[in-house]
Image: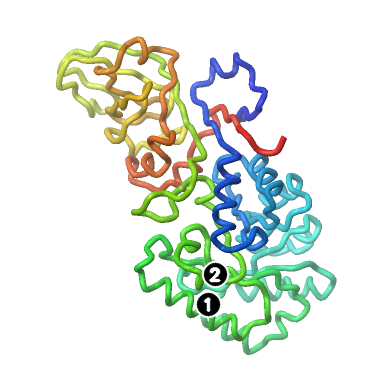
Amino acid sequence: MPVSDRRCSQRALERAPSILEIDLDAIVANWRRLAALIGAPERCAAVVKADAYGLGAAQVAPSLFAAGCRLFFVATLDEGIALRRIVPAAAIAVLNGLMPAEPAVFARARLMPVLNDLGQIAAWHGFARRGGGGAMLHLDTGMARLGLAKDELARLLAAPDLLDGIALAGILSHLACAGDPGDPMNAAQRADFAAALAHLPSAPASLAASSGLFLGREYHFDFARPGAALYGVNPTPGHPNPMQQVIHFKGRILQVREIDRDRTVGYGAAHRMGRAGRIATVAVGYADGWLRTAGHRGSVGISGQRAPVVGRISMDLLTLDVTGIDPAVARPGALVDLIDPSYDVDAAAAAAGTIGYEILTAIGRRALRLHRGGPG
């Protein structure tokens, strides 16, 4: 189990192979920035699925609730049940929707299923007529994942009584290309969503998540559902990041050794030294979220200097060329900066050939987690 305690002992800090510092105040500041963009705090929800993108829903959700966030989205029923214990007064919606035999479980936990197909609508309709709670409706306007496709929507509109008795707390869809403002699919999805809303019962509508908020007011509708932007991922790729950085991920040097020219480093002898130098081995590998695809790519900060990653990433270790760095700094026991404001989560993702979302959710459970700020 990860350690996540503001009163973490000095001994725990000293023995930790890696440390993930999480700035709760920065997360709150990001939420407030997005709430201001849409116009009001009550119009800005927060997505805290996957344990708040790996950063700790038990700490993130209360911080956001204290700041004024009242609607949270999770992916699964179990996530919703756990979150209900954390923020008992919040509204919580479950994006993956309703599975068979679950309506009563949703009701007991005061959770709203996001109804994704006609079968889920029928199941919740029958339950709602017996006194069940509210739900949301998901329309597929282009993702072809969850949500009612056009033919299902047409069948629903032909039988509107299927929604009788269901207190619709929201109607939502999801943009496929929001990170590219010039993609014509954005406008097409917005138009399809607006057209569908005109034929459905009145309910708060939501199309924009993180990047969608930056496409313009016509994409905002009644409320937004930001996720990754809350945690510092850039919602405007190719432009300066408007969000504050949230995490500082550090790994500990285990060993530094002198390496002769032509010696190889790591599995597969994939890196060969072009000159004599020094290699530092750090206690972070792909089991800790430093993806194997980042081998031979990117760099790590050591006391303000950059040390290139060399060789393959292994399960528990990565290796750095620290030849040009003062041995008094690059020494066993010292911490190196894997992700910090100067080399953010998007930079780490680019080096691994992936996206910031995956980097955040991949950070392993061996990292000692320290939450800074927040209520109390």
Crowd tier of the residue under label 1, counting other residues whose Cα lies within 10 Å: few below 14, some 14–19, many 20 or above:
many
| Picture layout, residue 41 above or below residue 361 | below
Q: Amino acid at mark 1?
A: Phe
Q: Could you tell whether 120 is left or right of 221 in the image?
A: right
Give the image location of residue 189, x and y in percent.
Answer: 46, 75
Disc number at residue 110? Answer: none
Q: Amino acid at mark 2?
A: Ser
Q: Can the viewer see residue 78 in this picture?
A: no
Give the image location of residue 22, x and y in percent.
Answer: 56, 35
**Residue ID at (45%, 25%):** 251
Give the image location of residue 161, x and y in percent.
Answer: 72, 85
Q: Quadrant of the C terminus?
A: top right
Where disc 2 sits, the SS reads: loop
In the rendered image, which quarter is residue 301 located in?
A: top left
Q: Could you tell whether 187 is left or right of 81 in the image?
A: left
Give the image location of residue 191, x and y in percent.
Answer: 48, 79
Crowd tier of the residue under label 2, counting other residues whose Cα lies within 10 Å: few below 14, some 14–19, many 20 or above:
many
Dot 1 and dot 2 residues touching (CB under 8 Å): yes
Q: Can the viewer see residue 144 in this picture?
A: yes
Instruction: Say which label, 1 or 2, has the lower sequence index.
Output: 2
**Residue ID at (69%, 52%):** 68
| Picture layout, residue 374 above or below residue 144 | above
Where disc 1 sits, the SS reads: helix
| Picture layout, residue 1 above or below residue 72 | above
Disc number at residue 173? Answer: 2
Disc number at residue 193? Answer: 1
**Residue ID at (67%, 87%):** 159
Rounded to the nearest angstrom, the CA distance separating label 1 from label 2 is 7 Å
Q: Along the line of sight, which residue is nearer the eye, 233 or 52? A: 233
| Picture layout, residue 232 above or below residue 35 | above
Q: Along the line of sight, which residue is nearer the eye, 367 or 241? A: 241
